[in-house]
Amino acid sequence: MSNANFSRRQFLSGCAAMGAAGASATLANLFHVGQAVAATSTASDYKALVCVFLLGGNDSFNMLVPLGAAYGDYASARGAIAVPEASAIAIDSAGYAGRNDDHRAFGLHPALGAGAANGGLSALYEGGSMALLANVGTLLEPIRDADEYKAGTSRLPSYLFAHNHQQLQWQTADGSAGVQAAAGWGGRLAEEMIRHNANDGTLLPELSMNISLAGQHAFLGADSVIPYAMSASGVERLVVPGADGGIRQSSLRRTLLGLLGVPNHLMADHLAATKQRAYDVAEMLSGLYDDTAVDTTRYPAESSLGAQLQSVARMIDISRNTLGVRRQIYLCTLGGWDTHADQTVRQGALLAELGQALHGFHATTRAMGIGHEVTTFTGSDFGRTFNSNGDGSDHGWGGHQIIVGDAVAGGDIYGQVPELRLGSALDTGRGRFIPTTSVDQYAATLARWFGAADIATVMPNIASFASADVGFMRG
């Protein structure tokens, strides 16, 4: 898969030559010097985290279904949106039962089944490469039960049940009550780990450690981390409409970039330098990207998420084999999960796309020989109400998440599945269950596997919780 005709040194030399003008900006220089100083030790292995954020709030209480004696309460609360017990795919939860003394049986939504086209997640679960983290959500501190929540004595995340605020809470996890920090936990993790991306003593600052396939989101950014954004169709180059010919394109691009700079204005010069670096990277990467391919038959057809993950696979191949990069964080998104209505049809289609895309991506990493080095995980705005509104469900709080990779201690459920009954101890109303695992703990577990030593800096609120490692990663 890798492009053997383009060496890492050639790429670095090319970037140095092309980026000379942009590197003259004072702020850009300070940023790059800071990175170089941090590059005192490097990792010899490669690791990537790939976040798949499910925009809108996945109703994960239909993704993981209670079976047997517990199914009656589930069916009663869910009504028309309940997954039929006979169609759920029963899974082994012996490890979960042993840790929690909870012997309920569980099954996966049938759309996640191995019988779906191109495979699904149930096969990865059975094979030990997929785990579930139960009832995870935004928290500032543990909340014992609904009585404590209703008493108003606990610190709560701001604007619970609101899409934009909870997406931000999920992606920043900074512990703030009220105003959110701009830094995402993926950005803070990159700041902690940037020293590992040294290349023979020379950094490649033009290409960010963090790459988004889904536009700008808080998750990947931090004070000294500017994510690199690209599209699922590939590297986006600056093309001037109506300008034919390479020389004319180049001249017009220089003119356009020059207009961004104001003489002796620090911020304007920094903006121009940033745009110049983005242009340089796009020019250098585009050829590499075009010469790298993945087996598209592993992925669902006409899938937004599948296309994004194919691009991630191609960028990983380039980054490892040509650039010598050691650590990367990627962000992909899949929308449509705000299922207030027509949930049975809509969520089934989304889960099928999610399962097949994740299955295809994991198969690709295995074919590349890095199944243990790439960990993919989901996040979402929130869980949803356990009871139905008739044709769907509404905004909730805690929910279940998926982790995939050969470094995952899979075939197991981690955390604690709440008592799935309206009016139970964790029900704040309508089955909005208080999370029993925080986003902080979820992220800290991933960060530890990634190699972060200073977990408290990456996750500043982690001391509020009993454990910084939920246990779903090997080693």
Image: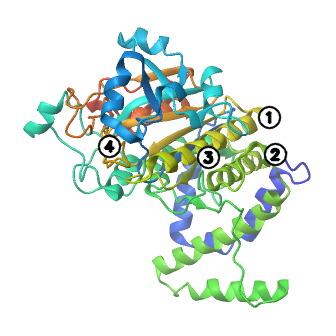
- In percent of width and height, residue 339 lies at 41, 52
Contact (Cβ within 8 Å) of mark 2 with mark 1: yes
Q: Earlier in the sequence, mark 2 or mark 1?
A: 2
- Residue that numbered label 2 is attached to: 295
The residue that appears at 65% across and 26% down in the rendered structure is 123
In the image shown, does 252 or 56 lie closer to the viewer? 56
Q: Is residue 456 visible?
A: no
- In percent of width and height, residue 437 lies at 34, 30
Q: Earlier in the sequence, mark 3 or mark 4?
A: 3
What amino acid type should be assigned to the residue bearing mark 2? Asp
- Residue that numbered label 1 is attached to: 367
Vertical placement of 117 versus 250: above or below? above
The residue that appears at 56% across and 33% down in the rendered structure is 110
Q: What is the secondary structure assignment of the residue under circle 3?
A: helix
Instruction: State the CA–CA distance, disc 3 to disc 2.
Output: 17 Å
- Residue that numbered label 3 is attached to: 353
- Residue that numbered label 4 is attached to: 388
What amino acid type should be assigned to the residue bearing mark 4? Ser
